[in-house]
Amino acid sequence: MRIAYALTHPIQYQAPLIRHLRAGGIDLEVVYATDITARGYQDAGFGTRVTWDVPLLEGYPHRVLFPGEPLPSGLRAFGRHRRALSAAFDEIKPDAVWVHGWGNSYPLAALRAARLKNLAVLMRGETYLDCLHGGKLRRAVHAAALSLLFRSVSQFLAIGSANREYYRCHGVSDERIQLAPYAVDNAFFQARCREASLNREKLRAELGIEPGRPVILFCAKLIPVKDPATLIRAVGRLAGAPAPAGASGDRVLANAPTNDVGAPAKVRDSDDRVLANAPTAPVLLMVGDGELRPSLEKLANEVAHGQVKFLGFRNQTELPALYDLCDLFVLPSVFEPWGLVVNEVMNAGKPVVVSDKIGSGHDLVRPGINGDVFPAGNVDALVEKMSPWLHDAALRERGGEESLQIINHWGFEENLAGMRQAIESLQQASHHA
């Protein structure tokens, strides 16, 4: 079965997946609206020019409908996109069209062009139920429109359990949903993290981080939806926070790192007792850039002085060293349909703490096992969830091992299996037609 994959633009996460599917026997050609992201572009979220340092257009057949043009948006472009896609489908002669999402004119135009040619449609999106906002009327209208749209889709490729439930709630039967998990190139990140571990202490010294000091990592755009301010405030409170209660009910944790002079750091609990084995104040590495950076730097100076380092935008090949260096990764977003950076850092074998508004938390984060989940925007809860991982090195080690085990079963091979199952279902439906 030949498949045309309609994507708005080359994406650093998608390119290696496409190559893997092709290597696994999926006859696939990508139809991009634009190639601007492969040329280098001004990213509005990062507030800087981005040129990805990994290949985006190599190793698979593709065509670009509008080279060098801005990313498509708005329903006014629908007709132009539909005509261009229809002509591309005439040349490719696919048996099915794969579309990603339905949030702009390009995938909707691809869906329409496919249906006019009586082609089967595969759909993969990111949305889950918590993404819906507004009152009952708006939700009802939204649900009715999507239920109608989804009737024209042959097979859905769910990125995770919450995404699968979203389709079910809009009238899609289980037989039309296959798991194609949102994944990154696990082999790439694991290999790069292993290489980076050889220079871990060198990087720590370059960043001015004392030996034994716990490292928390944030890696995302510095924009309101990522809510980096909540994390900065939580890190400031951790400096003087008491150690969490131990399993026996006391408040002393073993195996915590020492301070920068080699002695156990001391913290006082609510009874003013000195606690042994508590870590020195953690350092937070803020990786990324964006509109909030000036205000966040000011906030960090006020509430977490000396604890936050802003590292700016880092490219794909630079990230594994930072993933390897950290002790705990935190993503506090108030809205995040998935959050592929969670996948990336789990390949470094690290525990992760995420907000309850992050889609990947449903499948990749197991509270108390490889990390935890906190209510978005709640500083006190975030302090509580981070604290055990920062106080107990053995817990971090076990959590990191669990992260690695989980992510090893959430990768490109599972995507290939899901795509094969979807194709088999399409073929069976065709035989019965």
Image: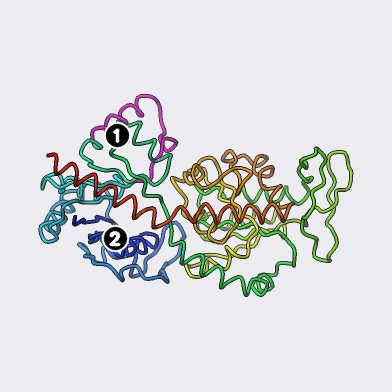
Q: Which quadrant of the view contains residue 411? A: bottom left
Name the image quarter holding the C terminus: top left
Name the image quarter holding the N terminus: bottom left
Real-space Cα separation, disc 2 to disc 1, in angstroms: 34 Å
* CB under 8 Å between discs 2 and 1: no
Q: Residue 335's x, y, as percent?
A: 48, 43
Q: Secondary structure at mark 2?
A: loop
- Going by the numbered disc 1, the residue's amino acid type is Val
Main secondary structure along the magenta-highlighted residues: helix
Residue 228 inside the magenta-drawn segment: no
Which residues lie in the magenta part? 125-148
- Going by the numbered disc 2, the residue's amino acid type is Pro
The correct choice, above or below, for 144 with respect to 108 in the image is above
Numbered mark located on residue 172 in the image: 1
Mark 1 nearby-residue class (10 Å; few <14, some 14–19, many ≥20): many
Numbered mark located on residue 343 in the image: none
Residue 128 inside the magenta-drawn segment: yes
Q: Which residue is mark 2?
A: 70
Q: Determine the residue positioned at 78% across, 46% down.
A: 243
The correct choice, above or below, for 255 with respect to 130 in the image is below
